[in-house]
Structure formats: structure tokens, C-alpha cells
Image (cartoon, rainbow, N blue to C red):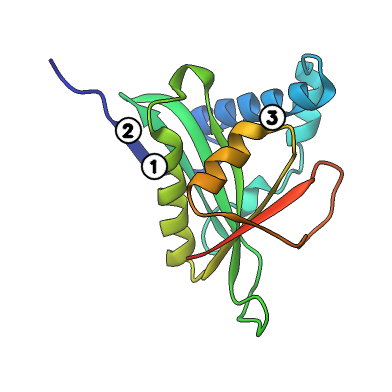
């Protein structure tokens, strides 16, 4: 019997698979925040001009995770610092980390984080940062399990409750 495996590869954010995964991501995080299902129009609005186009070299990277060839998850990194800063160094932001529910618990999230950390290093980053919400407990648990620790806020916004960082 063949063993089903994960593959993670760079992919433009506008391919059909990447677009579907980004829509699923936004649907889940928005629905949890609003405590009701997000509408298709709300998802469209949330993805319009969301900056995902920067998740490509030289400013970032976007990966699609597949399990047995089936699109299962995605994530990106975005360079925050154009040049070394004495206080922060070259930082990359971890963003849009998502695994479809049917693929959770199979080790894909850790592999995705590893691949994105490698991508950030390849872009010149020395530190990874991220922000998330307190209600996204699974995400916060994943980050802590992979060496991320709470840091002071490095940005502000309506959907940011806690910030994490990790030296690469």
C-alpha cells in the first residue's frame, strides 16, 4: 500500500488551489470572529486588496501544502524590514497559516511552518514574527509548540490580540 505524503511548494496566490485555500482561511477566521458564517460577499471583500500579492519574491513567499496531491493548506511569509535594523534585524511575518479541517492532526502544520521558516531565511530574514487573535487557540498552541514566544506588539489592527516571535 502506498504511503500518503505531504508536499509543500511555492505557488502564486492567485492559482485556483491557492485562491480556494485563501477563501477557506478567510471564511474560517471571519466566521469564528463574527460567531456566524461569513457570506461569500464578505469573503470577497476581505480578500480584495489584502496584500497577498506581496507574498512572492522578493518581498515574500506563499506555499501550498498538499496531502496525497490534494490541496490541504497554505501559508505565507512577508518581509517587514527592507534592510537590517539595529533593534529588530531583518524580520519576516508569518501569515495566512491554514489547514483545511479534514487534514488537521496529520503533521502538516509543523511541516508548513518549517517550510515557511526556510523560505524566510532564504529571503534574508533572521527573525519571524506574527500576530493572531486570542480565540484562535489551535494556532497559538501550534506556534508555542514550535518555539514562538509572546513579544510586544509590532503592529496594530482590529484583529490582533497577541504577537509572537522566533529567532531563525
Residue 152 position within the rendered picture, expressed as x and y whole percent measured from the top left: 75, 62
What is the CA distance from the residue labelled 2 to the residue labelled 3? 23 Å
Residue 122 position within the rendered picture, expressed as x and y whole percent measured from the top left: 42, 65
Q: Residues within 10 Å of mark 1 (few under 14, many from 20)?
A: some
Along the line of sight, which residue is nearer the eye, 48 or 87?
A: 87
Which residue lies at the image location 55% right of the left edge and 46% below the top edge? 143
Q: Which residue position holds label 3? A: 26
What is the CA distance from the residue labelled 1 to the residue labelled 2? 8 Å
What is the CA distance from the residue labelled 1 to the residue labelled 3? 21 Å
Q: Quadrant of the N terminus?
A: top left
Q: Judge left or right: residue 83 versus residue 152.
A: left
Label of residue 39 in the image:
none
Which of disc 3 and disc 2 is earlier in sequence?
2
Label of residue 6 in the image:
2
| Numbered disc 3: secondary structure | helix
Which residue lies at the image location 30% right of the left edge and 23% below the top edge? 68
Along the line of sight, which residue is nearer the eye, 12 or 60?
A: 60
Which residue lies at the image location 63% right of the left edge and 54% below the top edge? 54
Residue 157 position within the rendered picture, expressed as x and y whole percent measured from the top left: 85, 49
Q: Judge left or right: residue 108 versus residue 137.
A: left
61 vs 80: above or below: above
Q: Which residue position holds label 1? A: 111
Q: Residues within 10 Å of mark 2 (few under 14, many from 20)?
A: some
Q: Are marks 1 and 2 in contact (CB under 8 Å)?
A: yes
| Numbered disc 2: secondary structure | strand
Which of disc 3 and disc 1 is earlier in sequence?
3
163 vs 15: above or below: below
Amino acid at each position: 500500500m502506498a504511503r500518503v505524503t505531504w508536499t509543500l511548494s511555492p505557488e502564486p496566490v492567485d492559482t485556483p488551489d491557492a485562491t480556494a485555500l485563501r477563501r477557506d482561511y478567510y471564511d474560517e477566521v471571519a466566521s469564528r470572529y463574527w460567531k456566524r458564517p461569513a457570506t461569500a460577499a464578505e469573503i470577497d471583500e476581505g480578500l480584495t486588496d489584502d496584500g497577498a500579492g506581496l507574498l512572492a519574491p522578493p518581498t515574500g513567499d506563499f506555499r501550498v501544502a498538499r496531502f496525497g496531491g490534494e490541496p490541504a493548506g497554505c501559508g505565507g511569509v512577508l518581509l517587514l524590514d527592507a534592510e537590517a535594523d539595529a533593534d529588530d534585524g531583518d524580520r519576516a511575518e508569518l501569515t495566512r497559516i491554514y489547514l483545511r479541517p479534514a487534514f488537521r492532526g496529520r503533521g502538516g502544520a509543523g511541516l508548513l511552518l518549517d517550510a515557511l521558516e526556510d523560505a524566510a531565511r532564504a529571503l534574508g530574514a533572521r527573525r519571524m514574527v506574527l500576530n493572531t487573535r486570542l480565540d484562535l487557540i489551535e494556532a497559538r498552541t501550534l506556534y508555542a509548540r514550535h518555539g514562538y514566544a509572546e513579544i510586544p506588539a509590532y503592529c496594530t489592527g482590529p484583529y490582533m490580540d497577541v504577537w509572537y516571535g522566533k529567532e531563525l
